[in-house]
Amino acid sequence: MKFIRINGLLLILVMARQEVSGGFIDMDTPLEARTTRSLVDKSVYNLVMSDEFNTPGRTFKDGHDPVWTALDKSDDDSSSAGGGSLQFYNSSFVTTTKDGMLKIESAFEKTEWNRFDHVQKQWKVEKSYFNSGMMQSWEKFCFTGGIVEIDIIFPGDPYIGGLWPAVWMLGNLGRATYEASTNNIWPWSFDTCDRKLQDKQTISACNEHNHFGMHPRQGRGATEIDIVEVMTGDSGGPFDQTDPPVELPYADFTLQVAPGIVKNRPQSGSLPARKDTVNDHGQLQFKAQTWYDGLVLKGNTSINPFFYGTYLDETKPGEPVTRTKEQAFQADAVGVVHQLTPAHFNRTHTFRVEWQPGRGGRLDWFVKAHKIKTVNGTSSMEGDGLGDQWTKAFTLKDESLDNLMGSKIPIEPSYLIMNVAISSTWGFPYDVPKWCAKCFDCNDPKCSCAFHPGFCNMLQSGDTAMYLDHIRVYQSNDPSAHVGGNHTLGCDPPEYPTKEWIEGHEYRYMRNPPFVYEDKKPLRKVQRGGGVCKHDVDCGGNIT
């Protein structure tokens, strides 16, 4: 067994055969956490990746870390039609603390840059009034199937809306915030030839030759599994549209998938109508709506009535990508909202997703239970995370997707993303007065009506951050122990390659001017050696 320390992360280079071969395990992970038992199939899974974030002062700028890359760029969504992203991702806002936590900070801080407008053929000054952080393992650590577990403290005030913290997974063919890489790639999970959908899915199962290392007649995409997203704010009590009642703040557990339902979709703001409604005269009043069957929800968890997916329409001039009318399509968000408490914002809580990929697979989200005393004895409610007992929140099985749309549980090699966004479409005031200026400068009094009370003070305090104590990934060595496809490691597995596609479309995975002038490739090489050392241990000089 060999070890090497890079950017404060001590990694196993070669592991014993009875464990899983790999180079992504943090040696600070406790021995008792090197395996876990599935809460679904009850078999033992082995640790294949971990980061305990115990070394203080780590940096994650491109080229600094062997596993993670923190971005230095704007979010492409901000220049899309209807896009509401307000943050600039700054790698200096991602670091590790003295007490062994990953810290992703958000703050009111203006950033300006020049962007070339290809429609008007001129350079324009762009501004962002907020800085935040996104860290991703794209093209460094990818996996297909297994268990992901995180210990996390959510940022900000739970009753002030506007922050969008998330930990999620995305298929390696798409790079988060690089919209050219995800256009008509995200979030397809469809491997059937349908001529009506062929133009909408770039890598279609109808294609005799997919080129760039893609297999012929294999549909591909960049699928998205949201381990946890958080919506904050003050709803004044439970929402009438949720069942059971859920109020702000809440967590989202979601699979985003295409193709989506086109006709008779549920309407945002209400639960799916499962049955036809007739009036007193026996006449049809409301037709039953089409949504996925067989969803399993437990405890303080409701179908998410506020977001059923995104329609990716024909693009307009000035957007960062081009999509024709024939390429426009519907994507679905199959997800739930789960009740959170203020405690989630001041101490660590544990979340887990179990992912069995492909046909016959499933997704299961779990939270830690909190045992409470009642008049009739001991019962449990989830949400506070003080107890050791795992509680299921949401299960989505492959047959639910297959039976309705022919889509499937993701089987794409996927990477991990952790970020805090700030978006006018997420937790910001919904009904603003017509006289309210659409601006987001906390220093401009005209913009105050665009924010919830206290939001600007929170972002100006210098103490708003999301913290992760650890992230761990486990996989099974026994394909017979679980449903779905095999668990694999790597960003370019033979069955679902990505390397040649990315190399053949490098420009889609690179930053736009003026940032691109510093980049020769989508990722910079990780520096090994050359650091200033006072002792061998400082730079991992002792390799045994």
Image (cartoon, rainbow, N blue to C red):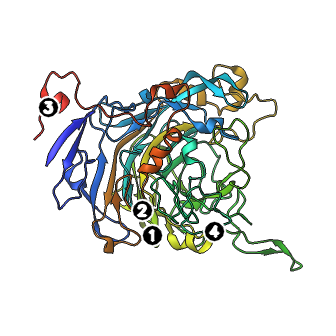
Identify the residue at horizontal 18%, vertical 23% (top origin).
Answer: 533
Q: Which mark is residue 361?
A: 1
Helix, strand or loop for disc 3: loop
Q: Identify which amino acid the numbered label 2 is placed on.
A: Trp
Q: Position of residue 362 (x, y in %)?
A: 46, 68
Tag 3 near tag 1, CB within 8 Å: no
The residue indicated by pointer 4 is 194
Question: How far apart, in angstroms, are the residues tagged by discs 2 and 1?
Answer: 8 Å
Residue at mark 4 to residue at mark 3: CA–CA distance: 56 Å
Residue 183: x and y in percent read 60, 48
Single out the mark in the foreground, 2 or 3.
3
- Return the residue at label 3: 541
- N-terminal of the pair, mark 4 or mark 3, is 4
* Image location (x, y in percent) of residue 80: 66, 39
Which of 312/150 is in front? 312
Mark earlier in primary sequence (2, 4): 4
Q: In this view, does 105 lie to the left or right of 541?
A: right
Residue type for callout 1: Gly
Q: Are marks 4 and 3 in contact (CB under 8 Å)?
A: no
Question: Farthest residue toward the right?
Answer: 281
Q: Which of 341 and 115 is in front in this view?
A: 115
Circle 2 sits on which residue?
Answer: 355
Give the position of the C terminus as an image quadrant.
Answer: top left
Q: In which quarter of the image is residue 233?
A: top right
Q: Residue at x 24, y 47 (%)?
A: 29
Q: Mark 3: which amino acid?
A: Gly
Question: Considering the numbered disc 2 on the image, is that residue within a helix, a strand or a loop?
Answer: strand
Looking at numbered disc 4 in the image, what kind of residue is underneath it? Asp
C-alpha separation, residue under disc 2 versus residue under disc 3 = 38 Å
